Amino acid sequence: LKELHGGRMTEQSVGFAELNKWLHKSKTPIDVDTGTLLFVCAYRHRHAYNAGDYLPSVLAFHRQLIILSVVNKWKFTAILDGASPVEKAFEHQRRVDKEDSITINSTYIAMCAKVCRTMFIDFVVAPEEADMQVGRRSNSTTAMGCDSDLIAFGNKIVVMIDNYHQEKYRIIDMTKPITEYTKDELPLYYYHHKYGIKIIHWWAATMGCDISEERCGIKHIGRDKFLSAVMQTILLPTAA
């Protein structure tokens, strides 16, 4: 994310008050990828959750929805995870192997969907993971969540919620015009703007993503080598 407009931690904002103003001004549909939020709520009560008692986690999710929809007055569609894609088997195993791991299951998701229904919050249970469904209704949709995959799936404006409780967020804007600063400081964004979403996909495949067998992607390939390869693959043939 630090390679994109608004993605650096130094650009992080604290407090949803300013975000509320920005959302009101933008007047675009909002899709919230609830995948990480459900995970955080479950992890906070992981001992009860792993013992099969999902209620504390569901109540935590309920409280967060109240904060977002009632306190902050967000009007949004909650996108819930569906079936885990086979392609993400490696990432799923990495999560399972972690100490104190939890596995989000369909029962817990169904309970959270019921919370949305009782609160009259629009929701969609995605065919697969929520991040794949976010932004599918309209190209102007503002995507919200904690997953950089929201960029890879082509969303133009992504509000990256780094911490719901502390109200920390960054606004990733993939529509910013190219400037000299962009070319010098954000070459990945520059290449994406010039050559399209495939640049983000190549970056994810090279540097590591959820479908990578190795978390680091291709070993011994870093940022500089990737950018050099992009120049050789795309720019030089074009110049010739």
Image (spheres, rainbow, N blue to C red):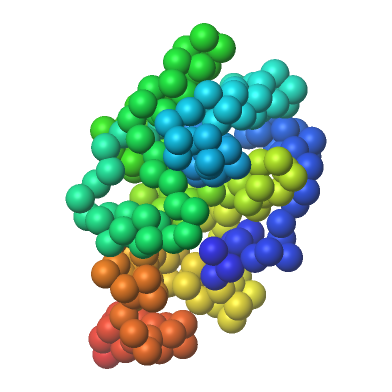
Say left or right for 1 vs 214: right
Report x, y in % for residue 77.
Answer: 49, 25
Say left or right for 121 vs 205: right
Residue situated in front as seen by the camera: 48 or 151: 48
Residue situated in front as seen by the camera: 50 or 23: 50
Report x, y in % for residue 236.
Answer: 31, 88
Q: Pick out the residue farthest to the front.
A: 51
Q: In the figure, residue 87 lies in which quadrant? A: bottom left
Residue situated in front as seen by the camera: 220 or 157: 220
Residue at x-position 38% and y-position 22%: 110
Residue situated in front as seen by the camera: 29 or 10: 10
Say left or right for 157 vs 24: left
Q: Can residue 162 be seen in this view?
A: yes
Q: Is residue 171 visible?
A: no
Q: Which quarter of the figure is the C terminus placed in? A: bottom left
Q: Look at the picture and state if 68 lies above or below 133.
A: above
Q: Look at the picture and state if 82 lies above or below 153.
A: above
Q: Look at the picture and state if 184 lies above or below 162.
A: below
Report x, y in % for residue 161.
Answer: 61, 46
Residue at x-position 54% and y-position 64%: 1
Residue at x-position 26% and y-position 37%: 83
Q: Pick out the residue farthest to the left.
A: 86
Report x, y in % for residue 55.
Answer: 53, 24
Q: In the figure, residue 119 lies in which quadrant? A: top right
Say left or right for 197 vs 189: left
